[in-house]
Image (spheres, grey):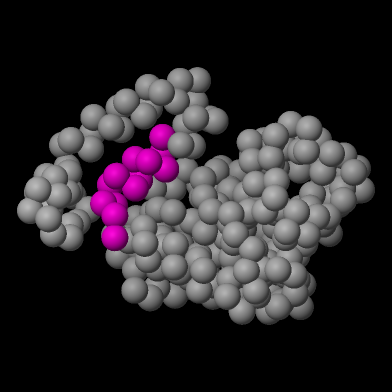
């Protein structure tokens, strides 16, 4: 698929995805969501890709929200379908990916933009970033998992406060409440994400995938412990487990192959 709204490239086993709508502050329109769904699917089916970094073009915004004009005249059923398809194809697809996704938040992350960042497994924010869910100012609520993921990350009280006031918070506050993992100068957002992924790349790929699945299951499954137990057992059947044990005994670095 040829992208009109994304820049996508793979370098040293990392897939870099830049939402390239700088004049629109990288707002998520239908076409951008379709392209994101495609690039997420590519990441999941491509063995070369060991991790993904998502960011926004320019220095002002990661993603400043959704393209409101596209759904301003929707009825209830159309609104439900908008949320259902977006969640299934993009937001849940990111969270459910076996590859670690890192959001490199290089400016405003508002509405659907913050929801996109929260769907990622790790978040790095620039020190000038502003984050928030302003949907109630439009007579809406977050529809791409925002009410759920924000609550999981920061707790019920803070989530209700942020969503019902629609107030933005800065990067320092976001780190304080657990919404982002790190705050760095804007010029270092990508390099910090690369640093984390380069460490993950040293680990067993199937074990990394199992760990992500098990952690996500702690929120989304009725019995996350069972998922963890099953994934733990599956690890014993992998070549990487045998390699990891051998490397430990032989006091050398592991050479994992993802099998």
Q: Is residue 61 visible?
A: yes
Judging depth in this view, the residue of 249 and 17 nearest the camera is 249
Q: Please tell me in which quadrant of the rendered image residue 187 appears.
A: bottom right
In the displayed structure image, the side of residue 120 where residue 259 appears, left or right: left
At 9% across and 48% down in the image, what residue appears?
249
Classified by dominant secondary structure, the portion drawn in magenta counts as helix
Which region is colored magenta? 202-214
At 62% across and 69% down in the image, what residue appears?
184
Question: Is the residue 176 above or below the residue 255 in the image?
Answer: above
In the displayed structure image, the side of residue 250 where residue 63 appears, left or right: right
At 76% across and 38% down in the image, what residue appears?
159
At 44% across and 54% down in the image, what residue appears?
100
In the displayed structure image, the side of residue 113 where residue 165 appears, left or right: right
**Residue 182 lies in magenta, yes or no?**
no
Judging depth in this view, the residue of 123 and 248 nearest the camera is 248
Q: Please tell me in which quadrant of the rendered image residue 12 appears.
A: bottom left
Question: Is the residue 220 above or below the residue 168 in the image?
Answer: above
């Amino acid at each position: 698929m040829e992208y009109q709204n994304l820049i996508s490239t793979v370098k040293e086993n990392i897939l870099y995805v830049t939402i390239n709508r700088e004049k629109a502050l990288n707002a998520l329109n239908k076409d951008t969501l379709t392209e994101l769904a495609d690039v997420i699917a590519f990441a999941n089916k491509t063995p070369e890709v060991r991790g993904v970094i998502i960011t926004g073009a320019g220095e002002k915004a990661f993603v400043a929200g959704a393209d409101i004009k596209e759904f301003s005249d929707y009825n209830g059923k159309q609104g439900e379908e908008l949320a259902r398809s977006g969640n299934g194809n993009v937001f849940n697809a990111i969270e459910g990916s076996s590859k670690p996704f890192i959001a490199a938040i290089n400016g405003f992350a508002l509405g659907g933009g913050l929801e996109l960042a929260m769907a990622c497994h790790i978040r790095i924010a620039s020190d000038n970033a502003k984050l928030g869910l302003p949907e109630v100012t439009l007579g809406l609520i977050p529809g791409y998992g925002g009410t759920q993921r924000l609550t999981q990350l920061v707790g019920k009280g803070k989530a209700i406060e942020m969503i019902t006031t629609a107030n933005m918070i800065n990067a320092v506050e976001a780190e304080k409440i657990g919404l982002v993992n790190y705050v760095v100068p804007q010029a270092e957002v990508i390099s910090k994400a690369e640093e984390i992924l380069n460490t993950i790349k040293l680990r067993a790929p199937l074990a990394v995938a199992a760990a992500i699945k098990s952690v996500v299951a702690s929120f989304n499954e009725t019995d996350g412990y069972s998922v963890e137990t099953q994934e733990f057992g599956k690890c014993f059947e992998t070549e990487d487990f045998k390699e990891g044990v051998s490397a430990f005994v032989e006091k050398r670095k592991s050479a994992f192959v993802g099998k």
